[in-house]
Image (cartoon, helix red, strand yellow):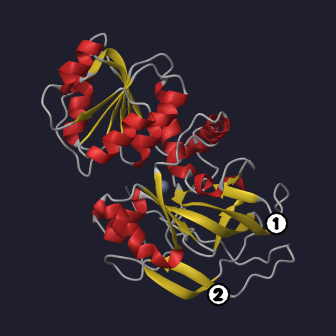
């Protein structure tokens, strides 16, 4: 990814009577290295005319935040030092800019973290999630690991009253799972999910809710394989055990109809394509850490496979689909959100994620 400009809102007075305190707590990248630091006297963001200011209630720790915490090559090349991190959250609007008409203080909201410039081909043709010059909350501009976050009104997602806060805090990754599943099309299809981390596990319950026939998964973590089974996978393969691809082929018409690739691990991607039937569809969300040799001839061309790259969430088709699936009552997310911790215990949250002891960790910001 290339570096994008930091675009924090410009100073314009908000129309609301809300008096934000001058300072707040925030987790920010304090240096070009590992970890994050808690600043207890961070300046509260200034609300632009078309922005809303949200008091954050709960925020999810994302794999992206872990990259930023660990300061890997991607983070070092992308993240501006000094930025407030975090992009998955739920909270209440406390102030709106002078030109905002659709939202009022008091509304419970989440937000799409990809901020489209609103101009250019993709932004204007229904593909804002892959618009040029995309700015990402908590990556390119100040995010939600703070008492207050400022987002453009176009990015606000009002949360249905029956969706609880801890679920509303993780709509961003759930949206990745929904986007991947819906783009691939799983109704009455045999589905293989390679990699059952946070989004892979969410994809199991989403695929089931969206009418998948049998769901097969592979991973190397026995705990997550067991959870995938609990969520509805009929087979949970240890990826290191030989013969699972043949086993899956025998149980289907020579392979899964649909592959949802959620690991980014080259060995899993290759095994996933081996387990995909000729003419099947592969939707790829996992990100390999670097380019690797891929057998395009056999995996895609001779196989007649359809391959879809999945990035973010469709704005806002995915959000409407996600709400519909949540309101159907068919999504099981309680076992995936393993920990809710007070914000001050953020270091513990990252540790739980790194050790694999936790799956989805949510910080209580209040
Ligand atoms: Zn995320």
51 displayed left or right of 304: right
Is 210 on the left or on the right of 281, as rendered? right
Which quadrant does the N terminus fall into? bottom left
Residue 64 at what x, y percent from top left?
Answer: 41, 59
Q: Is residue 143 above or below residue 88?
A: below
| Left or right of residue 291: residue 9 | right
Q: How many neighbours does mark 2 have within 10 angstroms: few (below 14), some (14-19), or many (20 or more)?
A: some
Pick the residue in front: 77 or 146. Answer: 146
Judging depth in this view, the residue of 285 and 136 nearest the camera is 285
Q: Position of residue 350 (x, y in %)?
A: 38, 68
- For the image shown, how many numbered marks are present on the structure? 2
The location of residue 177, given as percent across then percent down, is: 48, 40
For disc 1, the marked residue is 105
The residue most toward the top is 253
Residue at 63%, 49% in the rendered image: 119
Mark 2: C-beta under 8 Å from nearest atom of ligand 1: no
Q: Residue at x 53, y 37 (%)?
A: 178
Quadrant containing the C terminus is: bottom right
Q: Nearer the viewer, residue 76 or 266?
A: 266
Please give the name of the residue rendered at 80% of the width and 82% of the height, measured from the top-left corner: 19
Kindly tell me whether residue 37 is visible in this rendering. Answer: yes
| Residue 148, placed above or below residue 50 | below
10 Å neighbourhood of mark 1: few (<14), some, or many (≥20)? some
Query: Which residue bears the numbered disc 2?
Result: 23
Which residue does the image show at 46% across and 80% down from the upper left?
82
Which residue is nearer to you in this view: 3 or 153?
153
Which tag, 1 or 2, sits closer to the chain's start?
Answer: 2
Secondary element at image label 2: strand
Whether tag 1 and tag 2 are in contact, CB under 8 A, the answer is: no
């Amino acid at each position: 990814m290339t570096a994008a400009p930091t675009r924090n809102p410009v100073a314009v007075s908000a129309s609301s009577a809300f008096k934000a305190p001058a300072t707040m707590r925030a987790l920010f990248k304090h240096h070009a290295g590992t970890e994050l630091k808690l600043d207890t006297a961070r300046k509260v963001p200034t609300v632009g005319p078309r922005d809303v200011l949200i008091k954050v209630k709960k925020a999810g720790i994302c794999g992206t935040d872990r990259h930023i915490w660990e300061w890997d090559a991607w983070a070092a090349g992308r993240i501006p030092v000094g930025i407030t991190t975090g992009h998955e959250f739920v909270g209440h609007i406390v102030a709106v800019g002078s030109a905002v008409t659709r939202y009022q203080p008091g509304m419970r909201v989440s937000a799409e973290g990809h901020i489209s410039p609103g101009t250019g081909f993709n932004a204007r043709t229904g593909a804002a999630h892959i618009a040029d010059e995309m700015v990402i909350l908590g990556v390119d501009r100040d995010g939600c690991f703070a008492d207050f976050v400022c987002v453009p009104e176009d990015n606000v997602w009002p949360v249905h009253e029956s969706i609880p806060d801890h679920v509303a805090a993780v709509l961003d990754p759930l949206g990745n799972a929904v986007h991947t599943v819906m783009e691939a099309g799983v109704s009455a299809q045999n589905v293989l999910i390679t990699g059952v981390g946070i989004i892979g596990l969410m994809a199991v319950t989403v695929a089931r809710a969206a009418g998948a026939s049998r769901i097969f998964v592979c991973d190397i973590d026995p705990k997550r394989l067991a959870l995938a089974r609990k969520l509805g996978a009929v087979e949970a393969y240890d990826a290191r055990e030989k013969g699972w691809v043949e086993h899956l082929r025998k149980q289907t018409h020579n392979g899964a109809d649909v592959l949802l690739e959620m690991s980014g691990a080259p060995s899993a991607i290759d095994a996933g394509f081996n387990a995909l039937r000729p003419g099947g569809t592969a939707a790829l969300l996992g990100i390999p850490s670097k380019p690797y040799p891929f057998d395009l001839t056999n995996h895609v061309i001779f196989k007649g496979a359809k391959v879809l790259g999945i990035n973010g969430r469709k704005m806002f088709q995915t959000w409407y689909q996600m709400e519909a699936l949540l309101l159907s009552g068919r999504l099981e997310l309680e076992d995936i959100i393993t920990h809710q911790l007070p914000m001050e215990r953020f270091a513990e949250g990252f540790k739980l994620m790194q050790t694999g002891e936790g799956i989805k960790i949510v910080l209580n910001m209040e």
